[in-house]
Amino acid sequence: MNQLKKTAAAVLKGNWQQGFTIPCQGLYPFQWNWDSGFIALGWAHLEPEYAQQEIRSLLKGQWSNGFLPHIVFHNPADSYYPGPEVHAANLSPHSPEVPTSGITQPPVLGFILEYILNRLDKDQAFLDFIDEVYDAVYANHEYFYTHRDPQQEGLVYICHNWEAGTDNTPVWDFIWDTFEVPKYDLPRKDTSLIDASHRPTNAEYCYYIHLIELFKEWNYNDTTIAAQSPFLIQDPLFNSMLIASNNSLIRLGALLGKAQQVAQLEAWNIKAKQRFNEKLFDPELGGYVYYDLRGERRLSHLSSSSFTPLFAEIPGQEMASSLMNHLDGGRFSGEQFERLLCASFDPTSDLFNSQKYWRGPIWINLNWLIYEGLLNYGRTDLAQRLKTDTLALLDKYGFYEYFECDREKNKSLSQGYGGNNFSWSAALCLDLLKSNQ
Ligand code: GLC
């Protein structure tokens, strides 16, 4: 295990750019929002000072209305498309000086701050740092509940598949079916950097770019987006991250004497958890699913996102058990446990593809979230299985971006999938190894 720890540390050090960490050389050469949260947790195990710098750098990209973009382009780089000129976030009156994208990503910062504080045994210097950034993170939550919840029901929407973090989950196929887009010239770089069959198709990319073109036409105005975006989704992963971050900001706010913010966060959270269970739980599938606000329908498919409400302590015991059954001998593990945990999409679905990005492979950040979620519900046995599967993959292949879940296929593979030396795979490995230290 010591070797694994050393290699993980080397990956993070290799991707460090004087103030922030890129997710992966070549493939993702800027600062990404939720990556930075997970990466900061990794740094807490190596250089806590870097964890602070990572978060400060991300917050430099925050907009004046509290919005936190999915990419901050601190540095020039030509190995990624679409870059800052395509996003053109400066069309919004709220954008900051540093170039950013105009879409966001799952809000992990609130709970990351609390995890780091706990990993550092309640270190006073880190608590002071939380005091410094608390209002900025709170402002991001306020942005969501003010601008992303048009019916004031407690659930926020995402308006782009990249906001989900699960870029090409098969669930989006049903949204792409509802509108047509022009054929764009796509100077993609990703498909020449790694195996193109593991990446989204050009047809899917035309949808991704088209949504950005629409938002630019609307100057990234939230009211127009809410009224007109053809993609408007309540995502169980995204809302779980927001609720988990609410949970943490409530506890941290109590430590820091932030009574007013705590009261507001509690009010948001009560409503959010109740509505989440009513609206996003599909009783027939026994799991949480996405809701299409435009089409007013549930998109009834299970994915690794379906289990993340465990992390935010949203389900009661009954709903939690039905989730766990899918992982324990159910469709995500197979009766004979022939699958490693946890596939990113339902392995029994026709839409499942074990090699293609978010259409099936295992991702380490989702595994980490589900692992911690299972611990929240006292399922140490299942959590342990998830951790063993995760560490075995990292140990065998190294710190790839995503991995094969089929146990048999893994016997003949020699590599993981996607980019290599991927930062959050390394960072979260360091966190999972904490109990072996
Ligand atoms: C991919 C992932 C996304 C991640 C980004 C940078 O787009 O789908 O979740 O944030 O890469 O690593």
Image: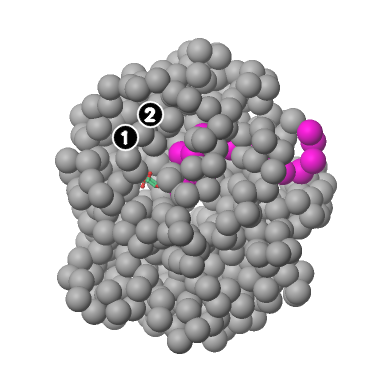
Residue segment shown in magenta:
151-166
The residue carrying mark 1 is 202
Q: Residue furthest front?
A: 350
Residue 139 appears left or right of 161: right
Q: Position of residue 90 (x, y in %)?
A: 45, 16
Residue nearest the observer in this picture, 425 or 305: 305
Q: Amino acid at mark 1?
A: Asn
From the viewer's perspective, is residue 193 above or below residue 1?
Answer: above
Taking the spot 30% from the left edge, 79% from the top edge, the residue there is 408
Residue 157 among those drawn in magenta: yes
Q: Kindly state the secondary structure of the residue where label 2 is placed.
A: helix
- x and y percentages locating residue 118 in the rendered image: 55, 66
Q: Are marks 2 and 1 in contact (CB under 8 Å)?
A: yes
Q: Camera-side residue: 429 or 283?
A: 283
Whether residue 403 is visible, yes or no, is yes
Q: Residues within 10 Å of mark 2 (few under 14, many from 20)?
A: some
